[in-house]
Amino acid sequence: MQSLLGEHIRHLRRERSLTQTELGGKQYSKSYVSAMERGSITPSHEALRFFAEQLAQPVDLFEQLLQQKAEHGDSSLVLEQDKKEYLHEAQQEVTALFNFILSDANPSTISLAREMLMQANEQQEASHAIRQARMAFLRGLIAQGKGDLTSSRPYFEYALVLAPEHQQAPILDALGTNYYLEQSYIQALSYHQRARQTLQQSPVEEQHSDLPMLIELHCGHDYCVLAQHEQARNHYEYAQQHLRSTHHLLLAAQLYLGLGYCTYAALYRVQDITEERRQTVEAYEQTYQRAISFLLQSRALYQASHDTAGVGRVRLMQAMILLDYSAWQRRYTVERAKENDTRPIFNNTVLLDDAEEQCYQVFMEWQENDVSMPEEKELLLYTALAYLVRLRIQRAKQARIGGNDSTGQRELARAASLCQLVLDAMSDEQRLWPLLQQVQAFRGPAPLATSPALPCLTEETLKSEHNPLIQAEVYQATGQLAQEIAKTASEEGFISSCYRQADRCWHLTLSQLRRLPTSPQCDTGYLIRAYHCYINTLRERVGTNPDLKEELYPVLLSLLEDVLSFAQNSIQLKDLA
């Protein structure tokens, strides 16, 4: 059994890309490390502590491996009765660990634990090493469930060394999840792909295993957060093929949420910025509708699981897609009207009504449920408010383009009023909840036409310490509002003020998004879509005011350079993955 210690140390050294000389440092030679890894020598306790520190591992795991040969190595010396007692005690410990895991609400953790126990039950007389692997794996899941990622990884790595190859897939998957939670997404994908390959080499009967669906789901999550949306969608589709009615509802909800988002996000590949017009109308409509269909399935599953936060996330993603779908339809309708020399007639009111309904449902669900998730709750509420502002801007824009100026002015005035209230709430937390009580008033009939006021960005608002994603959503809505107000104004000085505010808000939006680390809440594709939207805004401004070409072209070129830089990084990430 002592060779297991050497094998474990060799595995950890290679995972960290260390040579034997680097591992030994100035205290132990390369030959000493080599002999220890082969099991030819027994390291002292001082050496164990040194190598544990070098590899960032708890020394007790190394000492446990070192002691195993003396305690359990010679099975012929173990009496049959002692063996039975030991097996009974081990089984009790495993059962206790599994029951503790069952108290965790994370369905992935429960599925992986069940997977390891199911494999163990296939061979009741499992070796001591396999039992140790099983217990280490379960302890790692418990630590991971508590958020103690530093402690959980050594348990998983220990279990990986002890477990036979055909039982390593769930351990590799758990290691991948460990890196995913640490936001080390390339490493996470590497482990999840290894788990996938191991499973393919040692196939498990699907009717008895959650692993095929679980590993494909996790690969999808990895690719999604790396903004490789087409690859993510492929893995989500593979996971969908393995989905069964016995799977946990939350896993299925995550799957359909990922499918919906990646189906939509794949439309925003960088090359599509210049190729949008080449896409057929039918292809775009089918893609949008397919994405929304997946989200409807996800929302139903989150509702069945009584997961209010999950329902809110899906509703807002649906609202986001509907707003983009509506904007795309508006651009297409305007282009067709120009070709036919007619006034555009818009038929996307249903889309905007549905987006509005999703936002108001978020307010209602969070007011009716006292869920202890303040940060996520705040993010969802501010995002819903920002979407309502954008929605009013779209209604105003369509009314203006369609020749109904009075309706456009009313909608724009309402958008400006709501936007100012949201900006004020950002500077004073006490204003948010009163605003949510007032927000229903913005759903009724529009007031009489008034001139929309340009929202004021105070120093208090700009200094707010809200989540950068909250600030990005609010500033983006404010920028779009300032742009639309400029189109309805007649005084040159005021128009210039509107454009300056629009540009300022867009730069604030991009600045906040660049501050955010890559995460499931904000992948790189989110930033690219923001650049895309700002570029379209400037192109639209030049189309309305040709005199601004010389002023805006350098800005457009700078933005395009940024997008291409992100595209290059995305390609590099793809190569690494």
Image: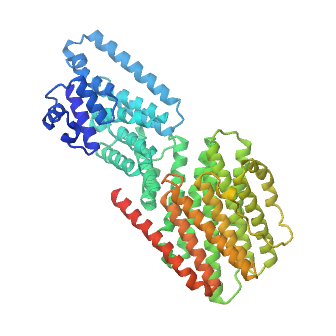
**Quadrant position of the N terminus in the picture:** top left
Residue 515 makes an appearance in the image: yes
135 over 543 or under it: above or below: above
Furthest-bottom residue in view?
Answer: 341
40 over 276 or under it: above or below: above
Give percent across and percent down for residue 72: 24, 18
Where on the picture, by quarter, is residue 43? top left
Q: Work out whether residue 391 or residue 287 is closer to the camera in this orientation and state it.
A: 391
Left or right, 20 with respect to 195, comes to left
Residue located 33% across and 17% down the image:
87
576 over 277 or under it: above or below: above
358 over 198 or under it: above or below: below
Residue located 43% across and 33% down the image:
141
Left or right, 191 with respect to 183, comes to left
**Quadrant position of the C terminus in the picture:** bottom left
Residue located 58% across and 67% down the image:
507
Residue 123 makes an appearance in the image: no
Give percent across and percent down for residue 363: 72, 50
Give percent across and percent down for residue 203: 32, 43
Where on the picture, by quarter, is residue 566? bottom left
Give percent across and percent down for residue 76: 19, 14
Q: Work out whether residue 17 or residue 92 is closer to the camera in this orientation and state it.
A: 17
Where on the picture, by quarter, is residue 385? bottom right
